[in-house]
Each structure stands twice: as C-alpha cells, then as structure tokens.
Amino acid sequence: MGHSADVRVDIDAVTALVTWKSSFADEVASRARQLASATGKPNRVTLSHYRQAASAAIQSLAATILDGDPTLDDKAA
C-alpha cells in the first residue's frame, strides 16, 4: 500500500453505484418498518427485521443491476 494507483471511474458508473446504494438502503429501511408494523410494534425495528428486509432487498437490487438503466447505457454508446 506504499504506492498510489491512478484510477479513473466513469461518471455513469459512479452515478449507478450511488443510485443502487441509495435504492437498496431505502428498500431495506422501508421493508424493516413494514415487518415491525406487522408484529404490532411499529416503533421498534430490530436487527432481525433489517436482516429479513435486506435479504429480500438483495433480490430487488440484483434485478435492478441486471436490468440496467437504458439512459446510462445509451450514454456509453
């Protein structure tokens, strides 16, 4: 780690990563709140709720990544 590498990342790649991260976090939080509400304690979201929510959100994230964003792909063409 004594040397630094010059790495360039396309803005479209960074934009996609930020979008995916934000979307995933929003979905996990929303699903966890729904799970908490279903248990009758909407004001108490637990780690278990987040784990369950993240598991489901991972599948959504994977689909989003695989489907791609045509507006980002068009810019690369």
Image (tube, rainbow, N blue to C red):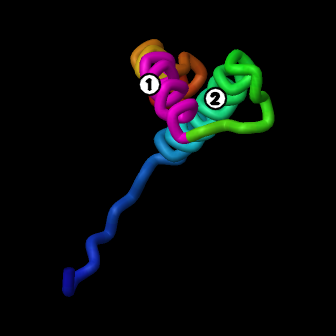
The disc, 1 or 2, on the residue closer to the chain's N-terminal end is 2
Q: Nearer the viewer, residue 16 or 37?
A: 37
User: Is residue 42 rendered magenta in the image?
Assistant: no
| Vertical placement of residue 2 versus 62, above or below | below
Q: Residues within 10 Å of mark 1 (few under 14, many from 20)?
A: few
Element class at badge 2: helix
Name the residue at 57% across, 30% down: 49
Observer able to see residue 73 = no
Q: Which residue is mark 1?
A: 55
Q: Quadrant of the C terminus?
A: top left
Q: Residue furthest right?
A: 43
Q: Quadrant of the N terminus?
A: bottom left
Kindly identify the amino acid type of the residue bearing the numbered disc 1: Ser
Kindly identify the amino acid type of the residue bearing the numbered disc 2: Ala
Residue 65 picture location, percent across and down: 44, 23
User: Is residue 59 rendered magenta in the image?
Assistant: yes
Specify the segment rendered in magenta.
Answer: 47-60
71 relative to 56 in the view: left or right? right
Name the residue at 55% across, 34% down: 50
Residue 18 picture location, percent across and down: 57, 43
Distance (Cα) linking label 1 and label 2 = 11 Å
Residue 29 picture location, percent across and down: 66, 34
Name the residue at 75% across, 21% down: 40
35 relative to 12 in the view: left or right? right
Residue 30 picture location, percent across and down: 69, 27
30 relative to 16 in the view: left or right? right
Q: Residues within 10 Å of mark 2 (few under 14, many from 20)?
A: many
Element class at badge 1: helix
Observer able to see residue 14 = yes
Q: Which residue is mark 2?
A: 32
